[in-house]
Image: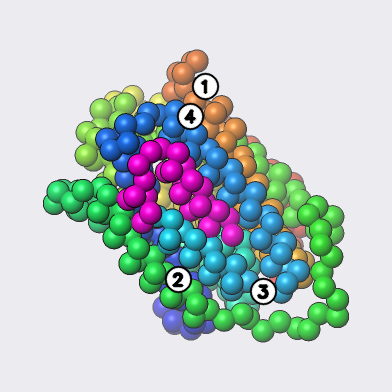
Amino acid sequence: MLKSVASLPATIWLLGLVSFFNDSVSELVYPLVPLYLASVLMAGPKALGLIEGIAEATGSLLKLFTGVMADRLRATKYWVVGGYALAALGRPLLALAASWPVVLVLRFADRVGKGLRTSPRDALLASSIEPARRGLAFGVHRAMDNAGAVAGPLLAAWLLARGMPIRDILAWTLIPGLVTVGLALGLREPARPPAPDKPAFRWTLRGFPPAFKRYLLVLALFTLGNSSNMFLLLRARDMGLPEDQVPLLWALVSAVAALLSTPLSALSDRVGRTRLIVAGWGVYGAFYLLLGFNGHALWLLWPLFAFYGLFLAATEGAEKALVADLAPGDRIGAAYGWFNLTAGVMLLPASLLFGWLWQAFRPEAAFGFGAGCALVAAALLRFWVPAASRRQGSR
C-alpha cells in the first residue's frame, strides 16, 4: 500500500498539496463568515442564507461549463489556476467589507473560483493516472483535502482564543492563498493523444453511456437526502453539546476522513467502485437513523460523527473515480461537470426539504427521510447500474 502511494505521479501529489492549502484557508474562513456578519456587520440569518444560496448555486452551474470547455480546449491547468487565484484574492478582501452586500460579492467570487476549477481539476487528476489506480489517486487527494479541513478550523479556533480580531484573521488568509496559486502554477497537462477534430460543443448528455446517466440519477436521489452538514451540527447543539465543542466535533469528521480516504478509495480499485459506494451509502443511512433517533445521549455523538467520517472516506474518492470509469475519454471534463452539477444543484432542495420536515414534524422525520433516500439509492446503484461493475472489471 505505502509503495503504491509513494509511486503516484507528481501531479497527484501536487494537486493534493494545492487542495490542502486551499482547504485549510477555506475551512478557516467558513465558520468565521456567520460570526463576522453577526458581530461586525450586524447582519442576520436571512443575509447569510441569501449569500450562501447565491454563491453555491452559481458555483454548481459553472462546474458544467468549465468541464465542457476543458474538453473542447483540451486544457485544464489554467482553469484550475484561475479558480484558485480568484478565491485567494477574494477571501482576504472580506476584511475590508463594510456591509453584507460586499460579503455577498466576495463569497460569490469565492464560489465562482470553485466552479471554475473543480471539474477541470478532477479531469486533470483522472487523466494523470492509469484507470487501475484511479481510486488510490482520488483517495490520496481527498485525504489531503480533508487534512486541510482539520487544520483550518483548529487554526481559526486558536487565533480567536488568542484574541486576534476577525478582520485580521481574514486579511492574513492572503498568504496561504498565494501559496496555493504558486503550487497550482507548477501543474503540468497530461500527455494526450492528438485529436483529429475538436470535440463537439455539447451541453447535453447525448453520447454518454446509459450507465453514466443512470449513475447521475441515482446520485441525485442520494443527494436529495444529503442536506447541508450544518443540520448535523445543529442537531448536536440541540441535543445539548456545548457550542465550543461543535467545531471540534466537525474536526473529528475531517480527521477520520483524512486518515481513511486513501486506503478505502484504493480498496475500490480491487473490489469495485460500486461495492464501496453502496457500503458507504449504507453507513450514511445508519448514521442518519442513529443521530435522528438518538435522544440525548451526548457521549454517543463522538463515535457517531467518527462514523460519518468513515462514510466520507469510503465514498468521496470512489464516486469521482467511477465517473472516469463510465465516461468517454474525450468527454471526461464534461462528465465531471455533470457529476458536480448534479451533486451541487440538488443540495438546495435537499436542505429546504430537510428543514421543512424538521420544523413541520420532528427531527426524526427529517433524518429518517435522509436515511431512506440513501438506502434506496444504494439499492439502485447496486442493481440498476450493473454496467458500471462490468466496465470496472474489464480494466
Q: Nearer the viewer, mark 4 or mark 3?
A: 3
Question: 327 or 282: nearer the eye?
Answer: 327
Question: 242 or 30: nearer the eye?
Answer: 30
Determine the secondary structure under disc 3: loop
Range of the magenta residues? Answer: 92-116
Q: Nearer the viewer, mark 2 or mark 4?
A: 2
Tell me the amino acid under the disc marked 3.
Ala
Residue with the mark numbered 2: 181
Q: Quadrant of residue 183?
A: bottom left
Separation of residues labelled 1 and 4 (CA atoms)? 9 Å
Question: Residue 1 lies in magenta, yes or no?
Answer: no
Left or right, 365 with respect to 273, comes to left
Determine the secondary structure under disc 2: helix
Question: 317 or 276: nearer the eye?
Answer: 317
Disc with the residue nearer the chain's start (1 vs 3): 3
Tell me the amino acid under the disc marked 4.
Phe
Separation of residues labelled 2 and 3 (CA atoms)? 17 Å
Separation of residues labelled 2 and 4 (CA atoms)? 39 Å
Number of numbered discs overlaid on the protein picture: 4
Disc with the residue nearer the chain's start (1 vs 2): 2
Main SS of residues in magenta: helix
Residue located at (27% from left, 49% from top): 167
Residue with the mark numbered 4: 367
Tell me the amino acid under the disc marked 1.
Leu
Residue with the mark numbered 3: 75
Residue with the mark numbered 1: 357
Q: Residues within 10 Å of mark 1 (few under 14, many from 20)?
A: some
